[in-house]
Amino acid sequence: MNATAKYAKNVWDGLKSSLVGMQITGKYLLQKPITVQYPLERLPIPNRYRGIHYLEQEKCINCLACARACPIDCIEMDAVRHGKELEWVSFTLDYQKCMFCELCVYPCPKDCIHMGTEFAFVSYDRSEFKHDLLSFKGMAREAKIRMLEAEEKKKRKEAAKAAGQEVADEPESDADAEAES
Amino acid sequence: MAQTAPDSKQGASPSMSLDEARVLPSGEREFMLDVRTQDMELNMGPQHPATHGVMRILLRVDGEIVTGAQPHLGYLHRCAEKIGENVEWLQYLPYTDRYDYLSSMNNNLGYSMAVEALMTGLEIPRRAQMLRIICAELNRIGSHLIAYGTYGLDIGAFTPFFYAFREREWMMALFEKICGARLTYSYIRIGGVFNDAPPGWLGEVERFCDVFEQKWVEYYDLLMENHIFVKRTADVGVISREMALDFGLTGPMLRGSGVDWDLRRDMPYSLYGEIWKDGAFKIPVARGEKGSLGDCWDRTWVRVMEMMESIKIVRWCLAHIEPGPIIGDVPKVLRVPTGEAYVGIENPRGELGHYVVSDGGKVAIRVRVRGPSFVNVAVTEALMTGTLLSDAVAIVGSTDVVIGETDR
Amino acid sequence: MLAVTETPLAAPAPVGDGNLVLDLLTGLRPESVPLWAVMATSALIAVGLAVALISLIAMFSTWMERKVAGHIQCRYGPMHVGWHGWLQPIADGVKLLLKEDIIPKGADKVLFVLSPAIVLASLLGAMAALALSPNFFFADIDLGVFFILAMTSTTTIGVVMAGWASNSKWSLYGSMREAAQVIAYEVPLGISLMVPLIVAGTFNLREASAAQGGWYGMHWFVFQNPFMLPAFLLFFTAVLAETKRAPFDLPESESELVSGFLTEYSGIRWSFFFMEEYAAMFLYSAVGAFFFFGGFESPFTWAVAQMAPHTIDLGETIGTLKLLGEGSLLHNLVAVATIVVKAFAGVFLMMWVRWSLPRIRIDQVMTLGYKYLTPLSMVCVLGAALFELAWIRFFGGAS
């Protein structure tokens, strides 16, 4: 290609490709934007979204399986065991560490820890990111009733044992306890 | 540094010593009688718009001309490999998301396959393989979209970046539906995948492919064919075939220099061998269309063309996927048999290798990662010398470096 | 050359019998106030108007830029402050005013503070020559275009000063690039403007506009000469480079030089450079409109000018006010609207280009300026002149 043709081709290419580019951008200029105005309208969040955890506390048996599965040990739980019933002290998740990998959800034997669709967790204070998943502390009302009943039964049993009637009572009380639980 | 050439006496004035003649990168000598200039040292980064994160490049510049360049890494070092020796096999998976955060699916796949290589007798169900490939290829598209968009940004075109993100957003929404995360997926687990595709998901992937094929033409016209873009990238940062092999480049950087090498075909893993035999996809290799072979334009071209090939692979999988189990027989507490394994896969940036050593316990005794970005970024030093400052930016952009991976 | 064409101009439109503000003030002046005080007040009012005009233009342009960029990129742009964010520039302005004014430690304080002022002042000076309607203008300068070009290139001094004073390597790069770029592109800018100047035979904006009033207000210079359209393209490209707009935004080039000469500037000083950029875009677009696309002339302006004159009497001090017909209030208003719309169309075109194209490298900028635009604009001037001569030779009169 001689110099003049090259010169002309450069001018022509520059003009033409610029016009092609402007045609594409111009097309989108007239179309409706695809973004949404975030606080006013929100995109749907799929069910499987891995956001802030939630806990079905009644089901949880404080087995620490999720805490062990966590790669960064951000789950800590504490509960006092009264026989079969649990008195919850804390179940905290440190969201400064949590990387939302969902590894804690799968080992759960009772299927009670899940990841929710909530994601906006904002605070001016770092300590607030240590989030307690418990919906109530202490003992659930039903659990308390169950525990008291169980204790009563135990006392009765002991009283009966003391009275020397252990053979007749024992199978019955076992069946009761199973029915209740 | 001054060079003395036999004929240099003619041009120089008698009062001037030949040592004062400075040699420009173009080979010309510059004679300055009274003016003494000094090269300037310029820190490009760690906070700089063109370094794609926190890479620092120490430039020595003479005006607009770069006379020396030295990349400094390590600003994002997070001890990823050491962590691998301290957490359980499965627990390391979320960390693999985080070294090349633009292609987490591929990282998951690489690590899972390295561990699976040690677990003899573990069979990965076919549906899981298919889902793995669909996700990995969609992720490759997303990664190349970022490479394309940010390269446009480096060159000064803002709009392609937003168009690329528009499609990437859809891709991320797809991943959000299948695994719940948008960037750090942890989706591909040892033995398979951990969630089956939700109902209608595969259909949506198909629609994504249809729309993407239309938009791809726009990407090509808007940037790749643009005269200014061609002039900015063609013949800039030329990596010859030999140089590419010497530096150990992989991925689009290697294919951009005309070397026909792709692990998906040449060392097939997962179902890629079958897909290749079926003739479903091709390996785009640069031909030096707009300038000399191995320039920045070629590398970008390879990435842009690969997006289309990925779409073809995804389509093949969609056509062949069948219902079935999604995870093999993996125990809950994973104890990997004693041994060592290296598995390299084709990441969007090149060969991502995982080398794992097990002593039969719950924890690896060594995890080593061969990151493609880390190897590829080494070539910038050799390319930048003698170019203009703007070209230096173009060269860094064309390596498509992800700092999370170079530093790990 | 001009003598040959015998300036095919209609007589210039009757320019109001003097300065409107001055007339008003002189009319209202009590005997005790000296005449010079009135004149000074009138000048101050004019300066105030010009500053207000620049601010308004800059504010509207920033809003427009963000909306255009947003919609091109499939997003909305500002939406929350006012209807579709139209009050956003005011919010931004308040924010910029309230920001801490940082002068870097190693900076040359005097130059650092002075350079935004120089940039803005030189543009203010250039604005003075811009006529907004046949009877509304700040200064009627015979060498109007010449004056505008000279004043706007003075901004370069401010930019170079800013880059040097910032004591930052990136800023220095930006300012050096700006200097090189402006020197390279002044030439094609001036030469490509020669083409309409040959046809118009005047440097005065209002006279050039008046020369395009035929054909029901559509006798624009672009339609008068086949070399006019290429000349406009060259002019437009040179203007992009002069105003530091993409693809010639090398002085700022965000991805290379962080922010170029603006790197160390913040707050209100930064906004001065910003205002200058947008006002310069408007000014150059207006010049382009005057010399290629008819200036005040459009079918609407023509229609108003054809109306039967109608005047009302406003009393002794002010005199009569023309409402309809040529040179009337309505005519002026339509002319203002016409030129503003045309100028903003040019600004919009610049934005469209900016958000479509990548940036050019510095050596390519020089190549484009010296090897492409300059010779091509010379060819255009030669061709246009020959065409005019031929037209006169074969058809008589001007084209």
Image (cartoon, coloured by chain):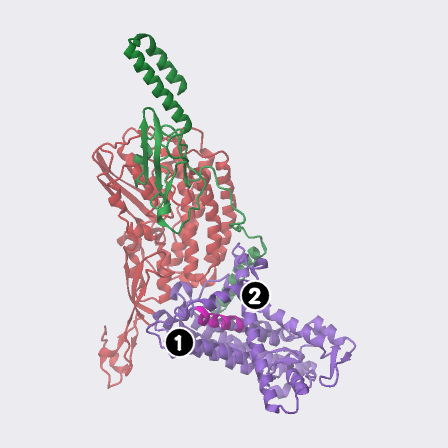
Chain colours: A green, B red, C purple
C311 relative position to B174: left or right: right
Q: Which of B229 and C164 is in front in this view?
A: C164
Determine the chain carrying the residue at label 1.
C
Residue designated by label 1: C112
A71 is higher (above) or lower (below) than A12 = above
**Left or right, B33 with reference to A11:** left
Image position, residue C115 (x, y; %)? 43, 77
Dominant SS in magenta: helix
Chain of the residue under label 2: C
Which residue is pictured at 42% across the width and 61% down the height?
Answer: B155
Residue B235: quadrant of the picture: bottom left
Task: Report which quarter residue B333 is drawn in.
Answer: top left
Q: In this view, does C371 lie above or below B291?
A: below
Residue C222 in picture, x, y percent from top left: 62, 73
Q: Which mark is residue C20?
A: none
Dot 1, crowdedness within 10 Å: few (<14), some or many (≥20)? many
Q: Say which amino acid is labelled 2.
A: Phe
Q: Nearer the viewer, residue B227 or B69?
A: B69
**Distance CA(mark 2)–CA(mark 1):** 32 Å
The residue pinned by badge 2 equals: C348
First along the sequence among labels 2 and 1: 1
SS for callout 2:
helix
